[in-house]
Image (cartoon, rainbow, N blue to C red):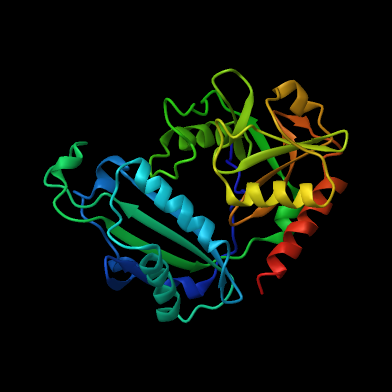
């Protein structure tokens, strides 16, 4: 079976990305020269954190919230970033300046615990400060493909509770989500829907999940799903525009009988879901609630210009 090439995070190819310069620990390097050591904590164990951000018409979207999440995550794993918020934002802006980027850019900021003397998990073997990498690329979502919606498959891999692994942490460790996605792809879907340890719907493998039932917008409680800034923006926009939003536990049975479903993420914004586990959701097309919420979100982005 051919695997799906559709994703809520998919983007159109842009030849300008061939020549972008990557920030690696104080230096700017060409793509094929931007490397880290095999002894780096991020490579050895996935010991690090990251943020995905967007540049829209010269403005870094929700940059303060991204820095809040980055520094909170670093604190939670006892990682000294070695710089202030102002310094970190300065590195991002310098990467954009060097590449002469002003709009339509997605930025991946990655910070690992740094170079180790030997490949093991003990942080006491770190030799120096953290490794900081900034990758800025031109990325534009294929709107025509996005409007057709995506198909999900419910994975047997579960989202963890905070006592096992707190998903509020944007960790480099993502293997369970990759496993879930691979399972979904082999099942003929585009992305994976994931449950928590109790069997309630949690999130997708890289995005947060919403349904619409009887005009109400439902999403997970936050216990076992990502601390998504787009998720928060959609919740706030829906509530401020008079829609009923519930962060609650709900089951697959309630998902299958929902009128609409969609996912949220930094790059893709809102993406409609038209099929889950072979079952058509609603009419199998973009629904009115999705259109309304997407319009609210697009207006929110427009305000950043």
The answer to whether residue 128 is left or right of residue 33 is left
- Considering only vertical position in the picture, is 155 above or below 207? above
Where residue 303 appears, x then y in whole percent? 71, 69
Where residue 67 appears, x then y in whole percent? 46, 57
Q: Closer to the camera, 259 or 113?
A: 113
Where residue 278 appears, x then y in whole percent? 73, 29
- The answer to which image quadrant residue 19 occupies is bottom left
- Considering only vertical position in the picture, is 250 above or below 293? above
Q: Closer to the camera, 88 or 154?
A: 88
The answer to whether residue 20 is left or right of residue 282 is left
Quadrant containing the C terminus in the rendered view: bottom right
The residue under the point 71% across, 49% down is 236
The answer to whether residue 275 is left or right of residue 112 is right
The residue under the point 82% across, 27% down is 257
Q: Residue furthest top?
A: 198
- The answer to which image quadrant residue 124 occupies is top left
The answer to whether residue 125 is left or right of residue 45 is left
Q: Is residue 188 visible?
A: yes
The residue under the point 69% across, 29% down is 248
The residue under the point 25% across, 57% down is 36
Where residue 100 appears, x then y in whole percent? 47, 82
Number of marks present in the image shown: 0
Q: Is residue 20 visible?
A: no
Q: Closer to the camera, 147 or 202?
A: 202
Quadrant containing the N terminus in the rendered view: top right
- The answer to which image quadrant residue 256 occupies is top right
């Amino acid at each position: 079976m051919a695997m799906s090439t559709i994703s809520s995070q998919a983007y159109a190819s842009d030849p300008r990305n061939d020549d972008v310069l990557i920030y690696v620990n104080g230096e700017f390097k060409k793509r094929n020269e931007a490397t880290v050591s095999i002894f780096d904590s991020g490579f050895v164990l996935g010991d690090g954190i990251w943020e995905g951000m967007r540049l829209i018409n010269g403005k870094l979207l929700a940059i303060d919230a991204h820095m809040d999440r980055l520094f909170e995550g670093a604190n939670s794993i006892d990682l000294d970033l070695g710089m202030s918020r102002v310094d970190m934002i300065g590195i991002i802006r310098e990467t954009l300046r060097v590449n002469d980027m002003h709009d339509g850019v997605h930025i991946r900021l990655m910070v690992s615990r740094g170079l180790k003397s030997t490949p093991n998990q003990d942080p006491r073997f770190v030799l120096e400060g953290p490794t900081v990498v900034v990758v800025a690329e031109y990325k534009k979502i294929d709107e025509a493909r996005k409007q057709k919606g995506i198909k999900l498959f419910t994975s047997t891999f579960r989202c963890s509770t905070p006592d096992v692994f707190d998903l509020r942490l944007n960790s480099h460790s993502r293997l369970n989500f990759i496993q879930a996605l691979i399972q979904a792809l082999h099942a003929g879907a585009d992305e994976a829907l994931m449950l928590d340890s109790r069997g309630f719907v949690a999130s997708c493998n890289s995005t947060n999940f919403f349904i619409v039932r009887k005009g109400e917008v439902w999403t997970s409680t936050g216990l076992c799903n990502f601390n998504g800034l787009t998720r928060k923006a959609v919740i706030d926009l829906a509530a401020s525009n008079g829609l009923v939003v519930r962060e609650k536990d709900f089951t697959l049975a309630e998902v299958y009988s929902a009128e609409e479903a969609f996912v949220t993420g930094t790059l893709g914004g809102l993406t409609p879901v038209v099929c889950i586990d072979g079952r058509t959701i609603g009419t199998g097309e973009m629904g009115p609630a999705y259109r309304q919420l997407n319009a609210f979100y697009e207006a929110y982005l427009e305000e950043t210009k």
